Amino acid sequence: QNWFRFLLNTLGISVGLLIFSFTYFLLLKARGKDVTSFKNHDRIVQITNSDSSGEKTYPVTNDDINRIMRLCISDFETVATISPVPFDGYVNVERPTGDFLPHSTSWIRSVNDEFFDIFNAEFLQGNNLYWENKTAVLSKSFAEKLFGNENPIDKNIELTDKTHHIFEVYRVVGVIKDIYVDAMGADIYISDSEVTTSPRVFALLNNKSTTEIVNQQLKNIPRVNGFDSQLIPTAKPISQKKSFLNQYDPFAVGLVLLSLLVLLSAIINFFNILVSSYITRNRQLTLRKIAGASQKYIFRQLICEIIPVLFISLLMSISFTEILLSQFTKLQIQNFPGINLYPQQIYYIQLCTTGFILILSIVLIVIFLNKTKKMLAAEGMRGFITVKPNKKILRNISLGVQLFFAFFLLSSTILLFNYYQKINSEEKIPLTRSDLNRIFAVPLLDFTLPDHHQEIINKIKTINVVEEVLQIGSFMPIGESFDNEMQSYFTVQTSYLLPDSIQCPITIICAEDNYFSFFNLNIQGIDISTLAPNDAIVTQSLMENIKSNSDTGSIDLGCGIYHIAGVVEEMPFVRSVKGGVWIKPPIPDITPGLYVKSFDGSENSTRKELMSIIREFVPESIPYKIENLYENQERVNGYPLAFYSIIGIISFFSLILALFGIYSAITVDTRRKQKSVAIRKINGAGRKDIYWLFGKLYIILLGVSFIISSAIIVLAWNNLSLDIPLKYRPNILFSLIATLIIVALFTTIVMLNKLNRISKTNPIDVVKYE
C-alpha cells in the first residue's frame, strides 16, 4: 500500500546522498586548504614588497630574491619560490607507439627544489633528487587520472595550450601527496629554472627567529637602481592560530549544512514511513509471533525490507553522480581547468552515509521490537501502538523540523532564481543579437601571430565585407577570455601625499579610441580623440562609488593615476561588482587581439575570410577558432545557467521531499489521534472544534519554524554578501512571504483533507477498532 511513498523516499535518499557527498567533499577540500596542515606552518612566512603604509603589497622580483639570498639572512633556513605557468595546462600522455594522446587539463606551477622541503611534500613514488629541466612531479590524484594504476615514473607527458600548441615534453620523476592549499597546490610541478615570472616567495624561519626580527633585517636591505625606493621587502606569516570553527571555508560549511538538511529531510521521511508501517502492521507481526516466529525472525523480516530501499538509493545516487560528473567535466574544460572532482572519494562518502542510515534503521527496529516484546497478544491484535502523552513532544519536533525544511529550501530556491533573474534582466549590453552575431574576436597572442599582428590587421582591413576593426590594448582580454576580464584595484585619492585607500575590484578595458563607437556607446560632449594618455572613461556605477568616497576626479589603477575625463552608462560584458574603466593602450604597438565587425548579412563570408588570413600564419594542424560575440556569450553564460539549473532542480526536488515530509507527518499525527477525535465527536464536538484541535498546533509550529528559518536565511545571506561581493541584491522579504504563503497553504490543504477523512468515520467503529 505504501509503494509510492517508498519509491519517493528512495529517490529522496538518493538525491540527499548525491548533494551531501558533493558538498562534504568540497568541505574536505576546504579543510585541506588550511595552511595549518603543514608541519612547520607557524615558521613559514611569505616575502612580499610593501609600500610605506603597509597596506599595498607587490610581487617580489627575481632581483629582490637574489639580493635577499646574497645577504644570507641567518634567520632563514631555506627559501622556496612558486610561479604560475603562463600557458594553459593541457596535458597529453605518451603512448607506446611514441605519439601523444590528448588527455586532460591541469593546473601547473613552477617551483624550486626547496619547495618540497618547506611544505613537507610527501613523495609516494620517485623523488626530486634529479630536479632539473624537463622533469615534472605530479600530484597523486592527477597521476591516477593520467596513468591509472600504472607506474608513472620515467613516463613522458606533453604540455600544450588550449590550441594544442606544444610547449614542452617532460619526464615524470615523482608523485607527491596532494596539496590542497590554493597558493601551493597544483597537478604538475616543474622546475623554476624554466618559468620564473611573478614568483611567490616563502621562507622557513629557524626555531629562534621571529617575523619581527626578520622584517627588521629586511628593512636594511639596500634598494638597487631601477626599483622603487618606497617598496620594502616584508615577511608575513602564512597562518595565525585558529580555532576549530574558523579553520573551514564558511561558504563550504554553509553548503554542507544545507545539503545535510536535505539528507536529514529524506531520512526523517523514511523513518516516518517505517514507524507508520510498523505501527499499522503490529497486528500482522503479532500473528506471526503467535504462529511461532521469533524476535530474530521478525528482525530479519524488517531489515530485509529496509536493505533493498537503501541499496537502490545508493545505486541511483552513484548513477546521478556519474551524470553530474560528466556534465561538470564538460564545463570544467571550458571554464575551470585545474578543478578536479575525484569520484572514488565521493562514492566513499555516499557508501559511508548509507551505512550510517542502515545503522539508524537497525536501532529503530530494535527499539520497536523491544517495545512489542512484552506486549500481550491481545494488545498486539488491537493493531495500533498508542503513544504516551509525555512523548507527544517527539511528534511536535518531527512536524516542526519538516516545516523548517520546507521554509528553508523554498526560500533558498526563490532567492536563487530571483538573483539569477536580476542578473539577466539588469545587465545592460548595448548590443542587439544581430550586432553580437556580426562582431568577431580574433586572438593574436597565440603562436607567432604577435610578430605579424600589423600585417594581419592591414589584411583584415582590406576585406570588403568588414565594416570596422577595433584593436585591443595589452591589458584587455580577447575572445575566449571575455569572461575573465583583468581584475585590478582602483584607489580613490583623498589627499596628495599619503592618501587613505578604498579598494574595490573593477574591470580595466584597454582599447583604441573607436571602442565606444564600435559598441554603440553614447558619451555626451566628449571628443575621444582629444583625450590625453592619462585620461580615463568610467562607468556610471563606478563613478557613483568614487563620488561617495572622494571629491577628486582621479583613479589609481596600479599602473598609474588617471584623470576621469568622462562617464558612460555601461560598458559591454563588464561583470565586476563596481563597474569598469576605459584607458588607451599604454603600449600602442602591442595588440593581443582584434574585434572585427562585418556588414549585416555578411557574417559567414567574414568568418571565412578571417580564417583564411590566419591560416597564412598558423598551419592547419593547429586548431584555431574564431568566435562571434553571441557564440562567446552563449558559452560563457552556459556555465552559470547550468549551475543555477542544477541547483534549482535539486532545490525543487528537495522542496517536494520537504512537503512530502509534512504530508507524512500530518498523516501519522491524524491517524494516531483518531480515537481522540472519535471521543470528542461522541461528546458533541463539531468539525470546527476538530479543526481547531489540530489547527492551533500547526499554527504554532508554522510560526516558530518560519521565524527560525527566516532568521537563519537573513543572517546567512548577509554574511555571504560580506564574503562575496554581489552586484545585485535579491528581494529577501518577497521570498520569505511567498514561502510562508505556499507552505501554510499546503499544510492547511493537507490537514483539512486528513481531518475530513477521519471526521466522516463513525466514532463507534473507531473506538471498537482501537
Image (cartoon, rainbow, N blue to C red):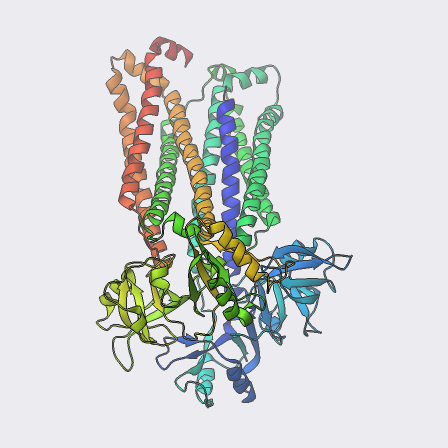
Location of residue 577 (image quadrant): bottom left
Position of 15 compared to 503: left or right? right
Q: What is the number of callouts on the image?
A: 0
| Residue pictured at 48% horizontal, 26% vertical | 5
Position of 63 compared to 769: left or right? right
Residue 355 position, x and y percent, is: 58, 40
| Residue pictured at 32% horizontal, 24% vertical | 749
> Looking at the picture, does residue 746 appear above or below residue 224?
above
Q: Nearer the viewer, residue 243 or 723?
A: 723
Can residue 75 be seen here? The reply is: no
- Outermost residue on the left side: it is 551
Position of 475 compared to 373: left or right? left
| Residue pictured at 34% horizontal, 79% vertical | 53
Q: Nearer the viewer, residue 284 or 525?
A: 525
Q: Nearer the viewer, residue 705 or 280?
A: 705
- Outermost residue on the right side: it is 97
Can residue 443 be seen here? The reply is: yes
Residue 387 position, x and y percent, is: 40, 25
Q: Nearer the viewer, residue 456 or 654?
A: 456
Residue 600 position, x and y percent, is: 41, 50
- Quadrant, the C terminus: top left
| Residue pictured at 47% horizontal, 40% vertical | 263
Residue 206 position, x and y percent, is: 55, 80
